Image (cartoon, rainbow, N blue to C red):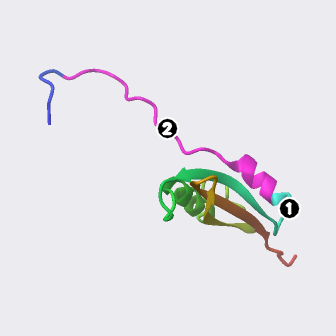
Amino acid sequence: MPVFDDVVWQEPAPRHGAPDMSHIANQLRSKPGETAMIAEYATETASGSPEATNLRNAINGGRLGFHDPSGTFRSSTRTVESGGNLYVRVFATFAFTKTDS
């Protein structure tokens, strides 16, 4: 590993923060119980795409704007073939949970 002889005084580049997908979450909240395809990623293998898996896990874990105390978001992925190419589609649903008042 190369080490400089002298330090270089410099601020690090800004981090690439996780995207805020609350606009998608809001659309899902508007139709509880209905499933929507929210993303599609091209892939080379039937096993899927890391991006689709990361998005599915973030939704199921309540991250990226998919947190709501009044219900839960559920997500799944499906690999499909279209025009000779493989795609992984990400589907999501908001499940409103009634609370007794």
First in sequence, mark 2 or 1: give its number. Answer: 2
Please name the residue shown 24% across and 21% down the image: 8
- Amino acid beneath label 1: Lys
Residue carrying label 2: 16
Q: State the image coordinates of residue 5 (x, y, percent, origin top left).
A: 11, 22
Q: State the image coordinates of residue 15 (x, y, percent, origin top left).
A: 46, 36
Could you say which quadrant of the image residue 57 lies in?
A: bottom right
Disc 1 element: loop
- Amino acid beneath label 2: His
Answer yes or no: is residue 78 visible: yes
Vertical order, 5 against 38 (above or below): above
Q: Nearer the viewer, residue 76 or 19?
A: 76
Residue carrying label 1: 31
Q: State the image coordinates of residue 60 (x, y, percent, origin top left).
A: 61, 66
Q: State the image coordinates of residue 16 (x, y, percent, origin top left).
A: 49, 38
- From which residue to which does the magenta span run? 7-28
Magenta part, dominant SS: loop
Tally the numbered discs: 2
Q: Quadrant of the C terminus?
A: bottom right
Could you say which quadrant of the image residue 3 lies in?
A: top left
Answer yes or no: is residue 62 visible: no
Disc 2 element: loop
User: Rounded to the nearest whole Å, what is the CA distance between mark 2 and mark 1?
Assistant: 31 Å
Vertical order, 10 against 22 (above or below): above
35 to the left or right of 42: right
Please name the residue shown 72% across and 61% down the image: 68
